[in-house]
Amino acid sequence: MENLLRILPSSPPSTLMRYGLTTVIVLVFFLIRLGLPLGGGYPFLIFFPAVFLSSILFDRGSGFLATFLTTVLAVYFFIEPRYTLVPPVEQVPPLVLYVLISCGIAVLSEALRRALERAQRAEREKDLLFQELAHRTKNNLQIIASVLALQARTVEDPEVKRIFDAAVTRVRVIANAHSQLQPSGDRSMVDMRSYLGDLCRDLGDSLRDVRPVAVRVEADPIELSTETAVPIGLIVNELVTNAFKYAFPDSQDGVVIVTFRRSEPGTIMLVVEDNGVGCPLEVKEGLGSRLVRLLVQQVGGTIAREAGNPGCRVVASISV
């Protein structure tokens, strides 16, 4: 039914057009009835679809017209004695019943169409409101990030400035997730390929300075809810930032690769690897490492760190 409504013109046709097309629909079913045997009981039953189509496509007035035309055609061509507009007495009750049912179909079909049109309008309005909410949320988060960035410029202590910069980056990660939101049924979903691509491009631009370090993203076309997408974005942010900080000292060139693929039903593998100096044997857990561990637990996953060949490799298994 909704597919039928999508092909209808945005504005209703004129009365002449509606009634002309209704007549065409009736004639089509009349020709179909001509090809059927004349026996078999009530010959006008084949005309119910013509009434329904006329009503659902146009309005109940078209359905009433279809009812009138099909009644006349049934009486004149298919009810014995044929070629007369006066039906025999025994055919009057079924004809009256046919007219009543057809008029009911016309009224109900028009009501059904209007209800579906209202539902479609409500769905479009909901999508617009959703997009407006996502846009406003993103803008508010960007404002917060900008205020934090301005505050960071006034700080002279390098450690405090680093903390402010990390906070700004994390807020922007959340803001970017809202820019990728798309309504999907009752939930809002994030296109992870686009989200991680934008996130890693921005991280590379802000972290590399003049160092020849590239960031590459290899992601499957996966959509996730914001409850899962935002923690994953924050995990990627921390791991890529750590790779830039520790994997490429002394302006060493290299590449950071972020892989996001569905390994099996219900499980997604997130891998962040680099070809830098490698993983140290002992790592002191700082705020970033604790944040990554907590975020992985939040999305019901596990994380492991291993030496690459060369470089370092972090693998997170995420349940979705």
Image (cartoon, grey):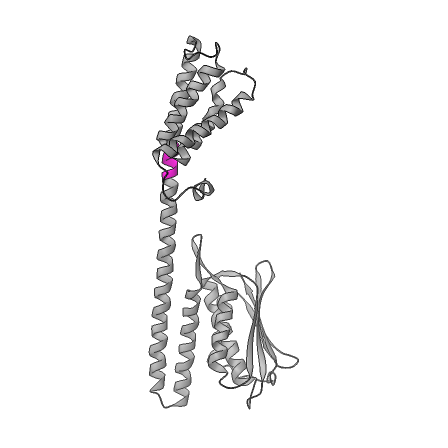
Is residue 222 inside the magenta stretch? no
Nearer-the-camera pick, 226 or 64: 64
Q: How many marks?
A: 0
Q: Residue 110 in magenta?
A: yes
Q: Residue at x 38, y 33 (%)?
A: 18
Measured as percent of width and height from the top left, residue 280 is found at 59, 85
Q: For the stretch drawn in magenta, what is the main secondary structure?
A: helix
Question: Residue 34 or 60: which is nearer the viewer?
Answer: 34
User: Residue visible at 52% across and 77% down?
Assistant: 240
Q: Is residue 244 above or below residue 82?
A: below
Q: Quadrant of the N terminus?
A: top left
x, y percent for residue 15: 34, 33
Q: Is residue 234 visible?
A: yes
Vertical placement of residue 11 versus 248, above or below: above
- Asked which quadrant contains residue 37, the reply is top right
Q: Which residues are magenta?
A: 109-114
